Image (cartoon, grey):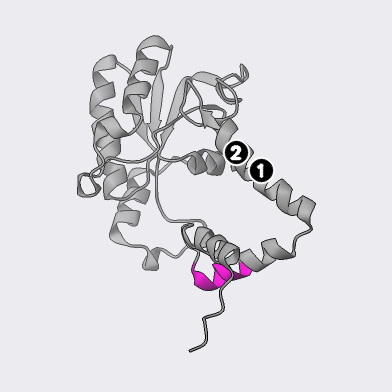
Amino acid sequence: MMNEYNVAPLSRLIEQFERMPGIGHKTALRLAYYILRLPHMEAQNFANAITEAHTKIKYCSVCCNLTDKDVCSVCSDERRDHSLVCVVEDPRDVMALERTHEYKALYHVLHGTISPVNGVTPDMIHIKELLERLKSDDIREVIMATNPNVEGEATAMYISKLIKPLGIKVTRLAYGVPAGGDIEYADEVTLARALAGRNEI
């Protein structure tokens, strides 16, 4: 019986790509062969970028966002409104909000949501750090910008109840009908959110 064709380093590379979210076997195969076709120096630079990101990126000591410094560039920016904090689930949410160029204040990254079904309790995300920050900093308003799903809503409500006794205003990011969307195709929750978050024109 013939041995199955196998190149161990290639197989390991494919396996590593397959472990990434959203990457199936075919995509992992394409990525692995792409890496193999790179000139040695470019492949080394790619490997170095992964290692450097892993060793140098950490959590900001203030907002828990990703940074390579003790305090991130957002928290250290004096031009921003330091009395307003937007609470998000993930560092990618910060990037999305920054792309709008509309928000000019601070953030706090939870790195997850409360989810008893998945075994995620309040002490497993960065709520404690947020409360400590609210006690010491001169913050007047907290915007809850967690996702509009069951876990996001539950997390927003839980944190709101903890903040209210501090005398700090808590608001919820308005969700509604997307630009270019048709009202007839919107679900009930989206329409209810759109009505609740309506603005004067």
Residue at image position (50%, 71%) is 25
| Residue placed most toward the observer, 48 or 120 | 48
| Residue placed most toward the observer, 54 or 147 | 54
Q: Are marks 1 and 2 in contact (CB under 8 Å)?
A: yes
- Say if the magenta span includes residue 27: yes
Q: Tell me where residue 22 appears, x and y as whole percent.
A: 47, 62
- Say if the magenta span includes residue 159: no
Which residue is disc 1 drawn over? 49
User: Disc 1 on helix, strand or loop?
Assistant: helix
Residue at image position (61%, 44%) is 50
Say which amino acid is labelled 1: Ala
Residue at image position (60%, 28%) is 68
Tell me if I can see residue 180 in this picture: no
* Dominant secondary structure of the residues highlighted in magenta in the image: helix
Q: Is residue 28 above or below residue 86?
A: below
Q: Tell me where residue 20 appears, x and y as whole percent.
A: 49, 57
User: Disc 2 on helix, strand or loop?
Assistant: helix
Q: Is residue 150 left or right of residue 5?
A: left
How many numbered dots are placed on residues in this image? 2
Q: Tell me where residue 43 appears, x and y as whole percent.
A: 72, 53
Residue at image position (68%, 65%) is 34
Q: CA distance from mark 1 to mark 2?
A: 6 Å
The magenta-colored residue range is: 24-30
How crowded is the residue under tag 2: few (<14 C-alpha within 10 Å), some, or many (20+)? few
Which residue is disc 2 drawn over? 53
Which residue is situated farthest in the front direction here?
Answer: 1
Q: Quadrant of residue 171?
A: top left
Tell me if I can see residue 65 in this picture: yes
Q: Is residue 121 left or right of residue 112?
A: left
Q: Is residue 85 above or below residue 132?
A: below
| Residue placed most toward the observer, 136 or 145 | 136
